Image: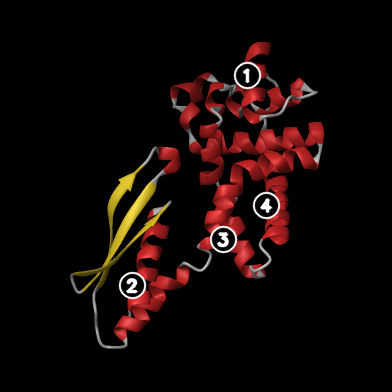
Amino acid sequence: MVKIELEIFEQKIGYTFQNKNLLKNALTHTSYANEKNIASNEKLEFLGDAILEFVTSDYLYKNYLHLKEGEMTKVRASVVCENSLYKIANKLNFSDFLYLGKSELLNSGKTSPAILADSVEAVIAAMYLDAGIDIVSKFIIENLKEEIENASKHVGLKDYKTVLQEKLQSHGEVHIEYEIIEESGPDHNKSFTAQVKVNGKILAKGKGKSKKSAEMEAARKCNNKQ
């Protein structure tokens, strides 16, 4: 990777590395490392995962005082995951800067959610080693703040479908059906609309960033009508 490409990547992530070798290592996938007999980003991924969990936990603890311990754990789990990191990688065009071996290039490695998510963790670790926790925390929260906020609002969603089922079935046997009726937006920022039908009758609709959250929102609205 030539110097100008590294500079472009640094502009995208909003940080200029003092140690460019750390950045290069963070962007080096195992397939490329094996071909060139150099170090891959696997160890950085390991460290980055731990930093990501800590920073997210710290942010939740300090900014979401109303959440209980179990709720914070659920929010963190829904945010510190491959899907969230894949979204960050897509937003910042990580695929344009990764070192991938020939085998991964042939197998669409540049679009692999796992490879892209791992590379984000590696860059997080590299940033931490280069500049410390404050800088990397800023990067993490800036890129996950929206996900955290959305997850915190829906932390109790898992109960809505159960509550609805128990409420309706207390009056006898009913058939509850959830259906995704609309899907919009690009792959990295999808929006879904779901409807809930009881014995064939549509009772409510809900929107969400995932199919599950859309169904839960529909169930919540249905609960409020009962």
Q: Which residue is mark 1?
A: 8
Q: Position of residue 201 (x, y in %)?
A: 19, 70
Cβ–Cβ under 8 Å for marks 2 and 4:
no
Q: Which residue is mark 4?
A: 56
Numbered-mark total: 4
Residue type at mark 4?
A: Thr
Identify the residue at image location x=60%, y=46%: 144
Residue 210: x and y in percent read 41, 52
Which image quadrant for residue 108?
top left
Marks 3 and 2 sit apart, C-alpha to C-alpha, by 21 Å
| Mark drawn on residue 152 | 3
Q: Residues within 10 Å of mark 3 (few under 14, many from 20)?
A: many
Q: Is residue 42 visible?
A: no
- Residue drawn at (73%, 55%), measured in percent from left and top? 58
The answer to which of marks 3 and 2 sits earlier in the sequence is 3
User: Which corner quadrant of the image does residue 176 belong to?
Assistant: bottom left
Residue at 50% in and 62% down:
154
Q: Nearer the viewer, residue 148 or 76?
A: 148
Dot 4: element: helix
Q: Amino acid at mark 2?
A: Cys
